[in-house]
Image (cartoon, grey):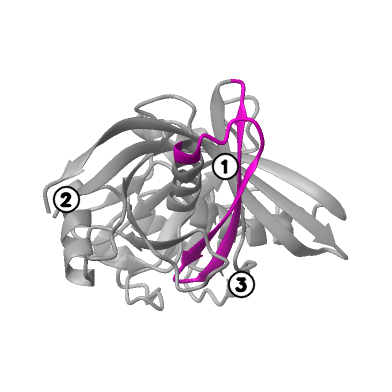
Amino acid sequence: MTHSYMIYGVFTDTALAGNPLAIVFDADDLDDRAMQAIAREFNFSETVFLTQPANPVATAGVRIFTPDYELPFAGHPTVGTAIAIAQQRGSKEQAALLVLEEKVGLVRCAVSFRGEQWFGEFDLPRLPEQLSLQVETETIAAALGIEPHEIGFENHQPSYWTAGNEFVFIPVSGLDVAARIRLDPHIWDNLGLVRASGSVASPYVYCRETVRHDCNFHSRMMVSGNGVYEDPATGSAAAAFAGAINQFDKPVDGPCQIWIEQGVEMNRPSSIRLEMDIEAGAISAARIGGHAVKVAEGTLAV
């Protein structure tokens, strides 16, 4: 049996930048064990497997695997998959509307073709929810290899949020501090920040100072475990980050658009668009969007 696949760079309009994503098509005959093995072989942060959806309103079923476990939802796989499906359909003349059936539920997506570039966005299947963070700033600083006084800016303080995946959001004073982050997995893994999946919630470091003039925040996200992995673009973290932005920045009612840069320190720069609809000071709806570029395609001989 063979399966076709494509590789995309997501949250970028430039090849070999952004977050790489493998998409395996027609994967209904693959069981969980085979999907996990293939994801481990690609060794990207996430690999998508497209299946026939159980819900008739869905365009496709989507399974998302890291090299070690399955995720209920992730941002760059959602954007990349929606764009890949729209490209296959040749949807250049008008916006393509799709519904992806993920473990978290049905995710509504829109894809458009603008100036020779593909742009995809999706409605958050879950709005941000704040979780309790019972960790001292000094301990967080030690885990990141920085000083306690370098954590926080304006009224921003560490916070813990989920919009399907849990992240600890850690504001730092500027780009120089963000560049010096070195995650100590031994300290971080002992903070008790265990996700529902059993993995450890990841730190998401951010500051107001940016490299690109058209971005509002600079960010880094690292995954602890067997070694430390840095993610070049994390859509599910940006989804949860909406809660922290609304809590600390208190945007006025109406639409609010934020651009977040990530992956700069890895030489895989990315740009994520976060849109929020604010009503009576609360988030009533939110969307994550970005570009994606196909960089390879092939066939799996399995």
Q: Is residue 106 magenta?
A: yes
Nearer the observer: mark 2 or 1; the answer is: 2
Q: Quadrant of residue 282?
A: bottom right
Amino acid identity at mark 1: Gly
Judge from the rendering whether residue 157 lies leftward or rightward of residue 35; answer left or right. Answer: right
Question: Where does residue 171 sit, x and y in percent of width and height?
Answer: 56, 51
Nearest the camera: 201 or 3? 3
Q: Is residue 155 above or below residue 137?
A: above
Q: CA distance from mark 3 to mark 2?
A: 44 Å
Nearer the observer: mark 1 or 3; the answer is: 1
Q: Pointer 2: what residue?
A: 2
Nearer the observer: mark 3 or 2; the answer is: 2
Amino acid identity at mark 3: Gln
Image point 24% across, 64% down: which residue? 186
Question: Where does residue 164 sit, x and y in percent of width and height?
Answer: 51, 68
Question: Where does residue 236 sit, x and y in percent of width and height?
Answer: 50, 57
Secondary structure of the residue carrying tag 1 is strand
Callout 2: few (<14), some (14-19), or many (20+) C-alpha neighbours within 10 Å?
Answer: few
Task: Name the disc covering residue 21, or none.
Answer: none
Task: Name the disc covering residue 120, or none.
Answer: 1
Q: Which residues are magenta?
A: 88-115
Q: Pointer 3: what residue?
A: 130
Q: CA distance from mark 2 to mark 1?
A: 28 Å
Nearest the camera: 116 or 149? 116
Q: Quadrant of residue 57?
A: bottom right
